[in-house]
Amino acid sequence: MPMRYSFGGDEHLFVECSEDMSLEAFFNSLSMTTGIKEAGIKGVTEICPANASFQIKFNPDVIHPDDVLREVKAIEAAATKAEPVITTRIVEIPVFYNDPWTHETLMRFRERHQDPTGTDLDYAARINNYASVDEFIKAHSGSPWFVSMVGFVSGLPFMYQMVERKRQIQVPKYLRPRTDTPRLTVGHGGCFGCIYSVRGAGGYQMFGITPMPIYDPTQKTSYLKDFMVFFRPGDIVKFKPVDRDGYDQAVEDVDKGRFAPPIREVRFDLREFQNDIDGYNAKLEGVLNGH
Amino acid sequence: MAIKVIHPGLATTVQDLGRPGYFHLGIPEGGAMDRLSLKAANLLVGNDEGAAGLEAVFIGPKLEFTQDAMVAVTGAEMPIKVDGVEQPGWTAFAVKAGQVLTFDFLKGGARIYIAVSGGIDVPIALGSRSTYPIGALGGFHGRAIAAGDELPVGEVRKATEGKTIPEALRRRPGMPTELRVVPGLYWHRITEQAGRNFFEDEWKVAPEADRMGYRFRGGRPLDFVAREQPFGAGSDPSNIVDSCYPYGSIQVPGGTEPIILHRDAVSGGGYFMIGTVISADMDLIGQMQPHTPTRFVKVDIEAALQARKDRAALVGQIKALF
């Protein structure tokens, strides 16, 4: 499918790589935004990749919108032929599933949910055909996730589950958005997982909470000293279930400045991944565990 | 020197002209919603046009000055008083140490801009002093000001008491307010009739209107072109695979109430957008109160660029006064 170009007023160019979400669409978006960065088009002030689309902001006092459009279109041919290979990071994120804080919040907003009688985990497990919440958590934490967009608010990652489409977890958003979500809630809406970087409104189903801050404007968190936002598009995430003790220990470690998320550099090749998804994921997990 | 906050107003924040460059991480540009008013206030007190001032919405703060200062208030119409004595808007006036700046009820517009010679000297965060409360970033400790705060002020600049911006150079939204829109983005998702209705109908600003976005009510719901929803988009016809959102873009969740994203926009999400308010009209939105009748006016890119030039010329005329 060809890319679709549209101006967002006089300051933005919006480009949809595909209507459907897929890792191919994300890689097209990523290679386009990389190409645009490298081209150094004058007047471009922001380059924002998203899941299956991207947006650039420009100063029309410096460059006419038609010229931006022409220069970006000129990059399309080369970008779509680019090898779908990146060098990125794989990171392990501890998650306390079914925790008391998201539980309290989901009970407080129960009348806004599709299924007021259960929890978000009960609901998600049932509609995705898992026999139990435990089976569902096993699936959620069993395969890696691909960060296909960073945004909404401060450094929030959108994550795409790295399994065949038919096995992907899908859930609707709340019927009406909540006005509150605990900070660091692990959520899910549509086919995307997310981690709420800050406390606030939200519509995604809530499955658990991570003790690992991913946004710190004070930059006191040991691994956020260089930059306040943890995630970048292209990161690969593996969730690791922890219990209450594991969660409390990690929170204490974060506070004392000794929490170090396991991170490894890894080369990701989309074609190899698609040839053998489970085998490739096992290899990725091996890299994470230092094999 | 410092300014003591006796009463903060409703939601008063430190703002400058924003922090471009971090939208790809979900950190918006932010800054004054009505940029022209902030620039004018700064110029009146001898500051650079982009110095940090205070933006107060609907209700003004009560501030005590610990030293002599030159002050200017622009933007919304709200009577200004120093120790109870009324002062002119859009004009530099002197405040003596120990005097208190207060405001009466709002008469028109929505946001005032208070500039102090030297600027509000909070630390720079990611290139700007603007407050982004959702991310607890910038401004005074990342939040709206509160009673008891002492706001630091920078080195005083040279300014002329009584200097004023003539009425003709002050820009205010009309009634009904017309906002010019370039259709696009996911415009193709609605029917032709719905597109005509959107521009024909009169809308009103809803109570849910803040720095992140302005919601509108009162027009007819938008009908969608039927389609099978793309994978990952969600089941509602107004859903898309989560994408970026331009500043000024108009999303219409469920096809019912349009929301214009403003300076503290969320950077993306899963609702389709039908177009974007032109850059020259973004300031006007910052001066709209709830219930303001609003018409959306369809324009093309060339008209948007011309409006941008006209607005730049207006700012140029203001600058030429100094």
Image (cartoon, coloured by chain):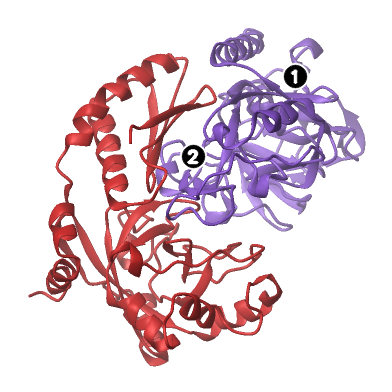
Report the Cα–Cα distance between label 2 and label 1: 25 Å
User: Do circles 2 and 1 both sit on a common chain?
Assistant: yes
At mark 1, the secondary structure is loop
Residue closer to the observer: A141 or B227: B227
**Where is residue A35 drawn, in percent x and y?**
24, 32
Relative placement, left or right, of A238 versus A281 is right
The N terminus of chain A: image quadrant: top left
Residue closer to the observer: B268 or B33: B268
Q: Which marked residue is nearer to the observer: mark 2 or mark 1?
A: 1
Q: Which mark is residue B128?
A: 2
Chain A appears in which tint? red
**Residue beneath label 1, please?**
B171
Instruction: Look at label 2 and name its amino acid.
Output: Ser
- Residue A259 lies, with reference to residue A44, above or below; the image says below
Instruction: Look at label 1 and name its amino acid.
Output: Arg
Relative placement, left or right, of B50 versus A136 is right
